Structure formats: structure tokens, C-alpha cells
Image (tube, grey):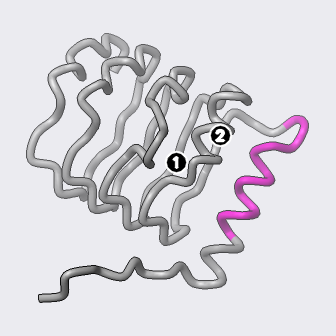
């Protein structure tokens, strides 16, 4: 068994899709959605959290990637406080952050087809979910 696992490098097509979607989200008149699905991501880029926070995005779509964790290093769920829809289906998530309860305006959370065995207790605080 190897000691270190090499991260799978995204294809050129996936990399271009991510760049395009990040640029699209920042354009004047852009809608409230950041869709970085099908980008072969192993983690959500820091820039996605910053974009959601600064531009007050309401929908974050990150399905069909290779995510094992929701939060990249040095990121906080507080960057996503305006998110109402969080679509994480078809990833490889094994857990959600304990502080999911901070997403108080969250109305839709899709985590189907992941490897979750339990949900954090703080999800009970999400009264609009």
C-alpha cells in the first residue's frame, strides 16, 4: 500500500470549465449561482468560498466531483452564510463539518450519493432546511 496518494489531476476540459464558471460568477449582472459541478475537483477552491462571500451567492452547486471534504484548508463556513441551496451530490464526502448549523438560511442540502454515515447535530439548527 503506498504511503502517499497522488491527487488525480483534472482534465484540461474540467480545468477550463472551472475557470469559465468562476469568471461567469464574477461578471456584472451574474445570477446568484456558482456552479462548479463536473470539474473533477478533489477540494473546493478557496476562490469559490471568497466568491460566494463577496458576491453573496445564494446557490452553490458542486456535484459530480471527487470531494472528500466540504471545507478546504483555511476556509470557514461563514463564507457561505448567504447560501440557500448547497448541492453536493455525487462526491466522496465522508463527513460534513460540525458547524453546518451556521448556514442558517440554508433551505436545500443535497448530499445523496456520498459516503456519509451520519450528519452533524448542528443540522438540527437549520430551521429552513
Where 63 falls versus 74 (above or below)?
below
Q: Is residue 28 magenta?
A: yes
Instruction: State the quadrant of the C terminus.
Output: top left
Instruction: State the quadrant of the N terminus.
Output: bottom left
- Where does residue 124 sit, x and y in percent of width and height? 20, 16
- Of residues 51 and 63, which is closer to you in this image? 51
- As helix, strand or loop, the secondary structure at mark 1 comes to strand
Instruction: Find disc 1 in the rendering and name its residue.
Output: 61
Where 109 falls versus 121 (above or below)?
below
- Where does residue 83 sit, x and y in percent of width and height? 53, 27
- Where does residue 17 sit, x and y in percent of width and height? 68, 69
Residue at 31% from the left image edge and 19% from the top image edge: 101
* Identity of the residue furthest to the front in this view: 3
Q: Are marks 2 and 1 in contact (CB under 8 Å)?
A: yes
Where does the magenta region start and end?
17-29
Q: Is residue 95 left or right of residue 30?
A: left
**What is the spatial separation of the Cα atoms under label 2 and label 1, in whole angstroms?**
8 Å
* Number of residues whose C-alpha sits closer than 10 Å to that of mark 1, classed few (under 14), some (14–19) or many (20 or more): some
Residue at 24% from the left image edge and 29% from the top image edge: 98
Where 71 falls versus 65 (above or below)?
above
Instruction: Find disc 2 in the rendering and name its residue.
Output: 33
- Of residues 75 and 18, which is closer to you in this image? 75
Amino acid at each position: 500500500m503506498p504511503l502517499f496518494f497522488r491527487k488525480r489531476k483534472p482534465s484540461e476540459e474540467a480545468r477550463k470549465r472551472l475557470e469559465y464558471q468562476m469568471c461567469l460568477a464574477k461578471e456584472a449582472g451574474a445570477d446568484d449561482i456558482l456552479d462548479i459541478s463536473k470539474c473533477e475537483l478533489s477540494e473546493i477552491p478557496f476562490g469559490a468560498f471568497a466568491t460566494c462571500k463577496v458576491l453573496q451567492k445564494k446557490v452553490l452547486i458542486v456535484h459530480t466531483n471527487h470531494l472528500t471534504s466540504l471545507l478546504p484548508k483555511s476556509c470557514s463556513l461563514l463564507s457561505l452564510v448567504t447560501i440557500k441551496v448547497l448541492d453536493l451530490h455525487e462526491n466522496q464526502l465522508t463527513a460534513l463539518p460540525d458547524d453546518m448549523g451556521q448556514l442558517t438560511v440554508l433551505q436545500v442540502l443535497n448530499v445523496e450519493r456520498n459516503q456519509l454515515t451520519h450528519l452533524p447535530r448542528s443540522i438540527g439548527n437549520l430551521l429552513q432546511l
